[in-house]
Image: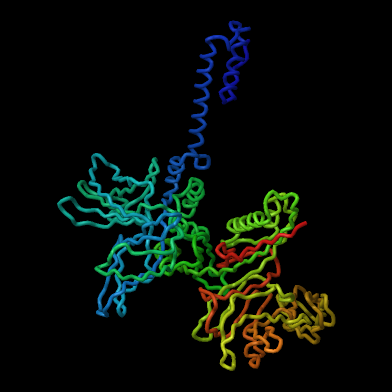
Amino acid sequence: MASRLNVTELDFDSIKNNLKDFLTQQSEFQDYDFEGSGLNVLLDVLAYNTHYNAYYMNMVANESFMESAILRNSVVSHAKTYGYTPRSVAASHAVLDFTVITDNNTPGTLTIPRGYKFMSNLIDGKSYGFVTLENKTVTKTGNNFVFNDLPIYEGRLVSYAYTYDSTSNPNRTFTIPESNADTASLTVTVQESSSNTDSRVFTTVQEYFEATSNSEVYFTQESVDGKYQIYFGDGIIGKTIDDGNIVVVSYLITNGPAANGADAFKATAALSGHTNFDIDVVLRGSGGSERESVDSIKFNAPLQLLSQNRAVTKNDYIKLINQRYPHFDSVNVWGGEENDPPVYGRVFISAKPKLGFEITYTEKEYIKNKILKPVSVMTVVPEFVDPDYTYLKLDIELFVDVTKAAATLADIEEQVRQYTLSWAATNLNKFDSYFNYSGLESGINILSKSILSNEVETMVGKKFRPDLLQAQSYVLDYGIELARGTTDDNFYTTPDFTMIDGDGIARQCYFEEVPSSYTGIESMTITNPGFNYTSTPTLEIVGDGTGAVALANIVNGKLESVTITNPGVGYTSAIVRIVGGGGQSAEVIPVLEGRYGQLRIVYYKADSLTNQNTKFVLNSDVNNGVIGSIDYTLGKVNITLFNPTNVNNDFKDIMIFFRPKSNIMRTTGNKIFVLDSGDGSSVTVESKLK
């Protein structure tokens, strides 16, 4: 009896060989030469047919599930079952302060209409058109009309009109012909008929269950060919449209991310006869992106079903913002109970734009009022917090074996620099990120066989912009423990700034760190008072110093306070052991005297005799010239009543850098570690030959 045909193989060659094996076991085909006969062609046909069917059935099975689907139209179709519409291509947008200059101060108003056009500077050899999407009217201020925070969007506005016929279009569906349409810019109006110009504006639906039979809303979906469609309600969910209605659809055709980075603009036409304009860029072009990818749809669509389009959890807020306003590089959200100090009834949001470092007031209000409030819990108020950037400066020292080098040292150093910037773009520049220098060092070591090892030295900096008109106080929160300035390279500030000394002379000044010397124990922090103490326990101070003595004060069985009777000397670290007393669980942390430092302002003056620069402390007769304090443990710097008259750079910003206590650091809340690729000094690479 012949063996059964093996049907487990699915590739062509295996199928054909299985057919041959089966036939050779039949008496009619024993010792038959299949390769040299016409039957070989029939076996090819059978094998191909079986292979095609197997491939087809495998694809059908794969495309039937969201997780395994490959084709975009299959993934989009599955996303519909979750109530999820994939994001279209998004236009790059910029924000301008646009001033129309006139020659008189006659009161009046001026309106910028929807579609008013600006042209950008050249980006990769091409200029892009930006337009306004809404009418905006302002009242004259003096001789000028000033449009502050005017949003403009890259692309070309187009409109299409469709006459509805229920016979040919029973589903009330209309296709947008361009695949690069930004659906966020859609406006939809419905005119009664060709003879009746009365029209109604329909808006995109946010909540299906809120759409009644009279709700003038439209819905969007992506079709199988990748283009977007709008469709109207059936008279039960959403107002329906009638035969003869004219549907007018207007939207942007955009180039997506191509115009990101545009930072100069000019108006292309007169505005109500005015042609004299002044344009300041508040936010350069950013936020342009391609349409949502298949992988992103697979990730986000199930989350839509889980959240039911509600903002309840942290991830709900992040998903909604990223889906409906895809212009941010990173978004973080935390509850008011997690805030410092706690603020109940609030949810805090911080966002980093894809380009630049700040988002505008207009963007914040749009996200709060248009995206989040309609779907937030009623008693929870969303509140934006600006990102708090901590700037990193990395000094990388390479140890190179030149005998193994296939490139010049300059090329190797540049390769390391570019790798570091790429590493930072992946691991930093976003919320809730870690900085671990060992991961960076490991990656650098494998870039070239000539790199024997490397060392990464890290500095962390905060930037602030002082008021140049009056004295102000400032707080810089690094969010990590800082190293004390025991060496010259643990602290520096840039650039210099101008201040007036007690004699009325302008001096070019710098900040200087004055660390406190480590000596003894300054105080004790009680972290747990414990319970059931019947007598006074002994406090044993263990550390690398000597002589510290402290006494416990017990009240009602608990540790009420600690008195330092001798601070001791030479402590750089210490712990406290609580011995005896009959109770338990009391805990105390010693605070070292070296926890705090001071900040003062210095300047240099040439000595007429030695012709060398001598350092002087500004206003040293007032509080010894101290103008601020440093808490190394909490990573906070307080600057008191600082009143420079100028800061010697274009942006008028001052940066203060410290060495971190540890090279393993993490950000929380609204804090972000940034390695600024636009700052040439943020990464320095130096080679040493071995």
Quadrant showing the N terminus: top right
Residue at (40% x, 70% y) in the render: 280
Query: In the rendered image, which quarter is residue 377 located in?
Result: bottom left
Q: Is residue 142 above or below residue 8?
A: below
Q: Is residue 277 above or below residue 500?
A: above
Residue 439 percent location from the top left of the image: 68, 56
- Viewer-proximal residue, 436 or 676? 676
Q: Is residue 674 above or below residue 474?
A: above
Q: Is residue 351 left or right of residue 129?
A: right
Q: Which residue occupies the extreme right position in the image?
A: 546
Label tally: 0
Residue 191 percent location from the top left of the image: 22, 53
- Viewer-proximal residue, 563 or 581? 563
- Viewer-proximal residue, 494 or 301? 494
Residue 430 percent location from the top left of the image: 56, 61
Quadrant showing the C terminus: bottom right
Residue at (24% x, 42% y) in the render: 166
Q: Is residue 420 above or below residue 244?
A: below
Residue 688 percent location from the top left of the image: 74, 60
- Viewer-proximal residue, 577 or 368? 368
Q: Which residue occupies the extreme left position in the image?
A: 195
Q: Is residue 219 left or right of residue 540?
A: left
Query: In the rendered image, which quarter is residue 422 located in?
Result: bottom right
Let me know if residue 309 appears in the view. Answer: no
Query: In the rendered image, which quarter is residue 530 located in?
Result: bottom right
The structure's colour scheme is rainbow
Let me know if residue 572 appears in the view. Answer: yes
